[in-house]
Image (spheres, rainbow, N blue to C red):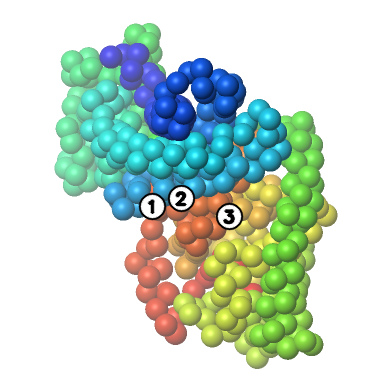
């Protein structure tokens, strides 16, 4: 059981289970399809079909990529049954299409045949839906959760107790909270924290990890107590690191600037910066070439709606790397001179400044594609925090702690916050998105960039940030702000200026 808890303590444990199950289903479905197609005759399969292994491996690989693109490997996913069916079905279609495209590159090795591919797609879709629904239920009732003892009974400790969703607590169980100061027990009652125990009782509670969550550590940190458990092989974790691991964002309420100061970020890694820049240029050029037909259609649509003399593109000021002002290229999605009389202003729901073509361009993020020019020039990266307008940055820097820190990396076409949070609708929502931006800055790597890029397909397809990962939802203030007639802050795609 201890071994299972150790595996469960990391993101890879749960993800590996999902990947292995999906690969197994895809492989079985493909082999079954080959058997059905050729009458379960090994000699006939070898004569007509050739080597089965590379074809099966290719099909399984692209199915996994399709599942990844639909956010189905997120550690905190919490889809409904209907959403699971829809996303898995679309993931299988994406994987099958990618497999067909791959076949055209190496037809002699990976050609699976139309009949086998169709059967494999149908069988894997049914199998993946069934196994995914079963595994999500099992993960919610995980019998080998890490047993966590929390040191503290104050506001910081309450953050663990307030993780109410099953997806948030899927990998751990807070078995007890240790009171280490006077009045802590009474404060715990007010905060709804339970059960509360004395340090002397902690040894009777089996645990796999201890989380230090004291509001004030000065003179109250039970060092001997922690060292005793550390010597037993129990992991001791700071609350900031614990919540980062479980929630996949950085909590601004407990984050100390000194914690960021001593963390080794991606910007201090020269090799990573060079590799990322090279990948940005290559990706920008390739995407421009591949999407050129779509770009031409967008140009034609804008001209048809607004007239032959209407501008197609516009450049807008955004705050970039190290606070430098850059000009962002986008397809024009608002009417000409939309802010001439009002100046820069926050958008409203159903903004009447947006044209009909503009709404379609925004829905599928087509209006952002000209930013490939900014990526090639070095103004932006493919993955990073979304750039914001200087007028809004000035406001947010005053009201949101550490907001300036997101300018330590190049802004991106897509990012971690875009996968986890819907369009910002208030200063509070900008604060929530900053939690995800800081998480990305701290954990940035080429692998994370690739995962974000693949999962951006999900945002494009569904036209919104994912609901699969359990990301924060718009606050009450946000919902009020999005009522007709109420101004609200919104991310770059919703704040055009001609």
Q: Where is the N terminus found, in terms of image quarters?
A: top left
Q: Quick one: label 3, few (<14), some, or many (20+) residues within 10 Å?
A: some
Mark 3 vs mark 1: give the one in front.
1
**Which residue, as the protein is rendered here, is positioned at the far right?**
377
Q: Is residue 360 left or right of residue 480?
A: right
Q: Is residue 333 left or right of residue 307?
A: left
Q: Please say if 410 is above or below 489.
A: above
- Residue 381 percent across, percent down from the top left: 71, 50
Q: Quick one: label 1, few (<14), some, or many (20+) residues within 10 Å?
A: few
- Label 3 with label 2: CB-CB less than 8 Å: no
What residue is pinned by disc 2?
90
- Residue 239 percent across, percent down from the top left: 40, 34
What residue is pinned by disc 1?
86
Q: Compare marks 3 and 2 and give the one earlier in the sequence.
A: 2
Q: Please say if 408 is above or below 24.
A: below
> Looking at this view, is 95 or 285 the one in front?
95
Q: Is residue 51 visible?
A: yes
- Label 1 with label 2: CB-CB less than 8 Å: yes
In three-dimensional space, the C-alpha distance between marks 3 and 1, rounded to whole angstroms, equals 37 Å
Write the residue at 47% across / 77% down. Answer: 349
- Residue 303 percent across, percent down from the top left: 72, 82
Give the secondary structure at mark 1: helix
- Label 3 with label 1: CB-CB less than 8 Å: no
């Amino acid at each position: 059981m201890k071994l299972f808890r150790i595996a469960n303590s990391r993101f890879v444990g749960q993800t590996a289970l999902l990947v292995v199950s999906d690969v197994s289903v895809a492989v079985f479905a493909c082999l079954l399809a080959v058997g059905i197609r050729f009458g379960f005759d090994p000699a006939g399969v070898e004569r007509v079909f050739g080597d089965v292994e590379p074809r099966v491996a290719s099909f399984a690989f692209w199915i996994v990529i399709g599942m990844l693109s639909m956010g189905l490997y997120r550690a905190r996913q919490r889809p409904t049954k209907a959403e699971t069916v829809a996303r898995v079905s679309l993931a299988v279609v994406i994987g099958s299409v990618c497999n067909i495209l791959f076949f055209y590159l190496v037809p002699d090795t990976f050609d699976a045949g139309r009949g086998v591919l169709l059967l494999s797609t149908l069988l894997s879709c049914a199998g993946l839906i069934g196994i995914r629904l079963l595994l999500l239920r099992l993960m919610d009732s995980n019998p080998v959760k890490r047993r966590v003892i929390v040191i503290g009974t104050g506001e910081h400790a309450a953050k663990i107790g307030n993780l109410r969703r099953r997806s948030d607590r899927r990998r751990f169980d807070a078995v007890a909270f240790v009171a280490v100061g006077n009045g802590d027990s009474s404060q715990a009652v007010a905060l709804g924290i339970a059960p509360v125990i004395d340090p002397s009782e902690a040894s009777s509670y089996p645990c796999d990890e201890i989380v230090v969550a004291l509001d004030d550590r000065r003179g109250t940190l039970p060092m001997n107590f922690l060292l005793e458990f550390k010597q037993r092989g129990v992991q001791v974790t700071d609350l900031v690191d614990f919540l980062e691991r479980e929630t996949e964002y950085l909590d601004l309420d407990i984050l100390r600037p000194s914690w960021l100061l001593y963390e080794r970020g991606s910007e201090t890694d020269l090799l990573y910066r060079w590799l990322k820049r090279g990948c940005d240029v290559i990706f920008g050029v390739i995407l421009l070439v591949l999407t050129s037909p779509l770009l031409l259609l967008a140009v034609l649509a804008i001209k048809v709606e607004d007239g032959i003399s209407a501008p197609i593109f516009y450049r807008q000021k955004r705050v970039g790397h190290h606070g430098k002002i850059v000009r962002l290229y986008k397809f024009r999605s608002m009417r000409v001179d939309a802010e001439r009389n009002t100046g820069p202003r926050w958008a409203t729901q159903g903004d009447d400044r947006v044209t009909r073509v503009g709404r379609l361009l925004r829905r599928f993020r087509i209006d952002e594609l000209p930013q490939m020019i900014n990526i090639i020039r070095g103004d932006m990266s493919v993955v990073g925090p979304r750039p914001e307008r200087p007028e809004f940055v000035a406001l947010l820097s005053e009201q949101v702690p550490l907001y300036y820190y997101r300018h330590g990396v190049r802004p991106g076409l897509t990012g971690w916050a875009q996968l986890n949070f819907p369009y910002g609708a208030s200063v509070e929502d900008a604060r929530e998105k900053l939690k995800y931006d800081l998480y990305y800055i701290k954990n940035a790597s080429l692998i994370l960039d690739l995962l974000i890029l693949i999962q951006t397909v999900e945002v494009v397809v569904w036209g919104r940030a994912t609901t699969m990962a359990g990301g924060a939802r718009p606050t009450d203030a946000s919902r009020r702000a999005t009522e007709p007639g109420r101004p609200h802050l919104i991310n770059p795609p919703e704040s055009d200026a001609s």
